[in-house]
Image (cartoon, rainbow, N blue to C red):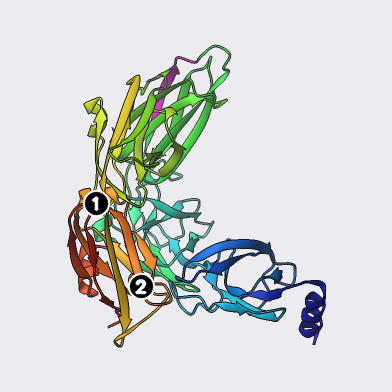
């Protein structure tokens, strides 16, 4: 009755249609306040364009008044929950469009599922809980990238939360124990290598229990040193130590110069020193491998370098963006100019008629940054050079179009994945593009460089690789520069 009265009041106050609704917690059906709800116009081709946004009130309710006729979708987002659309039934599933006509009032209920979590316990050699030890969830790909972090309590219990649907490794961090001994970073179920670790699949509302293990014993070390080169007017320096188990920071006075980091396991690290005021005119960068106690790791701050990003080869407005990455993840973004030294990944965004074809770096030494098969962009090393130039060359973009069929009929609003098996091509398209079919079942991938690609339409795949794509029934397509190829796909269901 209250809902009906509210809808009648809203209708009387507004010209045009109304979409009103409530967001609830799926597990309990309780209303979710402070949840963002985005109103999106659904285009004739099935795409979505943001129109407005609202935040639910204390009763979990939201409303969008005075809407013109048309089709709309709703997307709800809240920290700790999976982003979810009205009418969505599964992860990556389609939304249900709300058709607004005249001054009709439309009601929508969105049930938000929690993100996944892993519960477990760290124990010592006597199966007694180990407290105050960090625990990390990593996406189950290399290089290691932390997704979520927790710390064990006084009984060794931990809960790593906020896991989006996908596959993960669980790993404890290094720690020094009461007697001066240490424990090393250890993957569940008690191994040091990622390829030997157990993979966990996170799903909405899933609490994975009993992930309990004993971190492996081993020595942890102290990293000590001095910083020189503090500029006039600066009183202190911030030093960051990063590894694949996270970052540590310390701030030291310029006069003292000395710094130290405790409890470091044998691993590869990166050190960055910069003025604590973050007026970055000078900095120091040093990659290092630690397998024993260090006498002194000294850092000399010098003028920070320039990074110039060039895009050439086609007459368009293509642009480039660089992101600084350390072993723990992304630290900064830049479109060029003065940047901190370190490793930078460069993303090139070509326009519709072009494709990222190749690149070169000057000086040549800067192109020698370490690469790996999971990189989604070219990586360069920007250290003590006065100027590093990244020159991207564009060519004619190729296009793959098609239709997704289910039981012989086109099906709309289903996901389509594009994967390049070749590492060099995958860097040029910046990972694994995804799209959704329009209302007629059509899809399109544009701005593609020449090469081989795998196409797949499915709800079932989270960890995308050549093997997983082929085993799920992906179709292989090879395209030349500037070519337009059409390929029909069948929606692949779980086997």
The residue at which mark 2 appears reads as 442
Q: How many marks?
A: 2
Compared with 235, 428 (above or below) is below
Quarter where residue 395 is shown: top left
Residue at 30% in and 48% down: 354
The residue at which mark 1 appears reads as 449
Q: Horizontal and vertical percent for residue 127?
A: 41, 62
Q: Name, please, the residue furthest toward the top.
A: 232
Neighbour tally class for label 1: few under 14, some 14-19, many 20 plus, Cα within 10 Å: many
Compared with 345, 439 (above or below) is below
Left or right, 417 with respect to 68, comes to left
Q: Which residues are magenta?
A: 223-230
Q: Which mark is residue 295?
A: none
Q: Nearer the viewer, residue 325 or 418?
A: 418
Left or right, 348 with respect to 69, comes to left
Quarter where residue 102 is shown: bottom right
Residue at 79% in and 75% down: 10
């Amino acid at each position: 009755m209250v809902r009906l009265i509210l809808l009648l009041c809203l209708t009387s106050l507004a010209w045009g249609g109304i979409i009103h609704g409530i967001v609830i917690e799926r597990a309990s059906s309780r209303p979710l306040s402070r949840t963002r709800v985005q109103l999106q116009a659904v285009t004739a081709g099935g795409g979505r364009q943001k129109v407005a946004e609202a935040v639910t009130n204390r009763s979990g309710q939201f409303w969008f008044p005075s809407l013109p006729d048309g089709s709309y979708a709703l997307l709800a987002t809240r920290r700790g929950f999976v982003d979810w659309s009205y009418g969505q039934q599964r992860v990556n599933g389609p939304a249900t469009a709300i058709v607004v006509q005249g001054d009709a009032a439309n009601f929508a209920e969105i049930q938000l599922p929690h993100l996944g979590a892993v519960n477990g316990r760290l124990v010592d050699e006597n199966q007694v809980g180990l407290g105050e030890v960090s625990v990390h969830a990593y996406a189950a790909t290399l290089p290691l990238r932390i997704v979520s972090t927790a710390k064990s309590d006084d009984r060794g219990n931990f809960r790593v939360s906020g896991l989006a649907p996908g596959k993960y490794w669980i790993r404890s961090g290094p720690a020094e124990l009461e007697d001066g001994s240490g424990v090393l970073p250890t993957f569940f179920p008690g191994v040091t290598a990622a390829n030997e670790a157990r993979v966990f699949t996170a799903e909405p509302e899933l609490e994975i229990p009993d992930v309990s293990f004993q971190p492996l014993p081993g020595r942890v070390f102290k990293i000590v040193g001095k910083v020189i080169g503090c500029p006039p007017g600066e009183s202190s320096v911030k030093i960051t130590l990063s590894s694949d188990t996270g970052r540590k920071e310390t701030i030291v006075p310029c006069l003292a110069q000395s710094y130290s980091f405790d409890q470091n396991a044998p691993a590869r690290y990166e050190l960055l020193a910069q003025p604590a005021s973050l007026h970055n005119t000078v900095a120091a960068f040093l990659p290092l491998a630690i397998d024993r106690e260090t006498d002194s790791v000294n850092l000399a701050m010098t003028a920070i370098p320039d990074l110039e990003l060039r895009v050439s080869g086609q007459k368009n407005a293509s642009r480039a963006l660089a992101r600084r990455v350390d072993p723990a993840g992304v630290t900064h973004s830049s479109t060029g100019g003065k940047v901190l030294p370190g490793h930078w990944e460069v993303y090139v965004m070509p326009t519709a008629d072009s494709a990222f074809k190749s690149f070169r770096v000057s000086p040549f030494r800067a192109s020698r940054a370490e690469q790996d098969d999971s990189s989604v962009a070219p990586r360069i090393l920007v250290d003590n050079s006065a100027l590093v130039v990244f020159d991207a060359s564009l060519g004619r973009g190729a296009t793959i179009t098609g239709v997704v069929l289910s039981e012989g009929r086109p099906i709309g609003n289903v996901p389509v994945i594009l994967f390049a098996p070749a590492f060099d091509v995958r860097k040029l398209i910046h990972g694994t593009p995804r799209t959704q079919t329009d209302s007629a079942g059509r899809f399109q991938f544009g701005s593609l460089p020449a090469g081989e690609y795998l196409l797949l339409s499915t709800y079932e795949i989270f960890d995308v690789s050549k093997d997983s794509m082929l085993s799920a029934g992906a179709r292989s397509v090879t395209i030349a520069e500037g070519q337009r190829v059409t390929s029909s796909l069948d929606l692949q269901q779980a086997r």
